[in-house]
Amino acid sequence: MCGIVGYTGPRQAAPLLLEGLKRLEYRGYDSAGVALVDDRRIEVHKAPGKISVLEKQLGAALPPGHTGIAHTRWATHGAPNTVNAHPHIDCGGTLALAHNGIIENAGVLRTALGQRGHVFRSETDTEVLVHLIEEVLAKGGTLVEAVAGALNQVEGTYGIAVISTKEADTIVAARNGSPLLVAIGTGENFVASDASAVLAHTRSVVYLDDGEIAVVRPTEYRILDLRTVEKEKAVTRVDWDLATIERGGHAHFMLKEIMEQPESLRNTLRGHLLEEEGTSRLGGLNLTDEQLLQVNRIVFTACGTSWHSALIGEYMMEELARIPSEVEYASEFRYRNPIVDERTLVVGISQSGETADTLAALREAKRRGAHTLGLVNVVGSTIAREVDGGIYLHAGPEIGVASTKAFTSQIAALAVLTLKMGRLRSLSILQGREVVRALAKLPELVERVLAKASEVERIAERMMRAANVLYLGRGYNFPVALEGALKLKEISYIHAEGYPAAEMKHGPIALIDDLMPVVFIAPKDAVYQKVVSNIEEVKARGGRVMAVVTEGDTGVARLADHKVEVPETLDLLTPVLTVLPLQLLAYYIAVRRGCNVDQPRNLAKSVTVE
């Protein structure tokens, strides 16, 4: 989603803002801009396309100014062009504003402001907000009072940064539903939508919550509410550094993150496994064993890749813990009067911890009395702060838009949670120990699969020209089929669909011919023989089969045109291994098709608006 970075301090702001924007590129965007205060005037530069286009426009002699804001835009209202790019300015050119989110009553406000003489230059909802602040400021008072007065008139979501010629060393930032933080330097301060934008300069950050405003100057900052009443906020130290968000010699962030999965899994599992007791330690749940035993239903809610991991969590929880579970699209959950109560546990899964729909679903669940847990990767994220408790993935920053290591870490975290719930109920200590040992061995098994990357690369060469691909799996590997298809769609733009293998006969089989590859996820698990029968049906119709199989398998090997072997593990953990060849397949196909792997078109890393 859109990115914001702001700076105020003794240094020239422009190079720092451009540096910050580049750190935010992974979030997805279609235009960029900067605004700087200099000599009591605001200078704005904007351009559609990549930040490099904006840089070229600015030229070698960057514009001066010690306070400024910058933005990468992902279009919602209005086409991605120069006029609609942020920052936006008021009628008099004395204010500039960058905005993430959507102002839902922008149409009404725009009409009223127009009737009062305001002239609009863009199609965006954001421009309404800067004119509204201009109008309030004209009545007197400080910049922060004007921002608060304007925000009290808007409906919707926002993360904003505002600068003014009247307070040339000040940035006013505010948040409602869109992430924003203040980063504290030495004699200089920053605002940003993501800590990665400012890590080169400081690791000390203050995360804003909804309904909060920050007044940021070079040597001080203040946090207030929308009534401009000051409040205390804790300073958080970001525990990862710039090296973790560099490509580390890999051609793309996505490939780097695929290859990091042995380590990211170790980090997710570290400190949680208790082999002797055959259970897991989860101090962050903030729920007692007695409270967990009162849970009689679990609802997992998520979007995209996280929704696929949630499906695996549902299967785990019902098999091992015997708790009725279901998976809800977060975007639908709060709009259909869901049935939850104090004995329902609602688990929200989100890599970023900022996914708007998942956050809204969790808030609705809490409102109805349910216990809430979050499985998130970003420490200090909104979901992490608002749920009753949860599990941090500790997978490290994920820069590639197509999620990879977060998915496998989510599965591992769900297995750890399931182990805890199962041992509180009917799972024996011997079964628990078996799960613990299998989880501990996973990183090593992942390394063995990733060592086969060259095999997958050769298969990708054969499949790169396909127009459609079908992914099929059963049991725990049906969600893997969905995830494999999503990865291919996201980054290569090849149409792909995932199905339960048995459902193939109920429609998709009509599509199969010698031009349509079919990817089967077929480890030797409880439904292996059924999948073999499905492969036979595809081969009988001339289909080309790629299969992910267990090491030493001969049954599928004789049928498949291409195969990749994965080590044996417990059925519930096979998705961690079987998804790896599918991640690599999507990556290598996309590279061969010349696609922008890390920043696929129309997609954003974190969807913070509906």
Image (cartoon, helix red, strand yellow):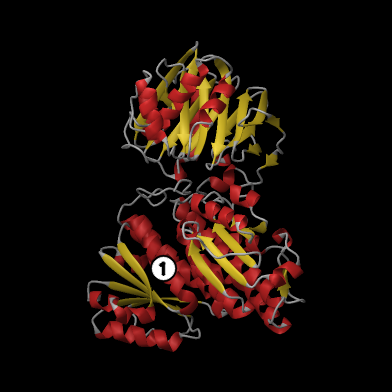
Query: How far across and how far down the image is residue 42, in percent?
Result: 45, 17
Q: Is residue 104 left or right of residue 379?
A: left
Count of marks, rendered view:
1
Residue 589, visible in the rendered structure:
yes
- Nearest the camera: 493 or 161? 161
| Whether residue 33 is visible | no
Q: Check disc 1 and report its element: helix, strand or loop.
A: helix
Position of 261 relative to 10 (above/below): below
**Where residue 401 sits: x, y (%)?**
45, 51
- Residue type highlighted by circle 1: Leu
Characterize the local packing of mark 1: few (<14), some (14-19) or many (20 or more) Cα atoms within 10 angstroms: many
Which residue is at a point 59% across and 62% down the rendered structure image? 347
Please name the residue that numbered disc 1 is placed on: 482
The picture places residue 388, in percent across and down from the top left corner, at 67, 56
In the depicted view, which residue is nearer to us: 306 or 558?
Answer: 306
Q: Is residue 517 above or below residue 52?
A: below
- Quadrant showing the N terminus: top left
State which quadrant residue 572 falls in.
Answer: bottom right
Q: Locate residue 550 relative to residue 594 in the image: left or right.
A: right
In the image, 191 versus 51, the foreground residue is 191
At x 40%, y 84%, the residue is: 531
Q: Quadrant of residue 298?
A: bottom right
Residue at point 48% right, 66% down? 308
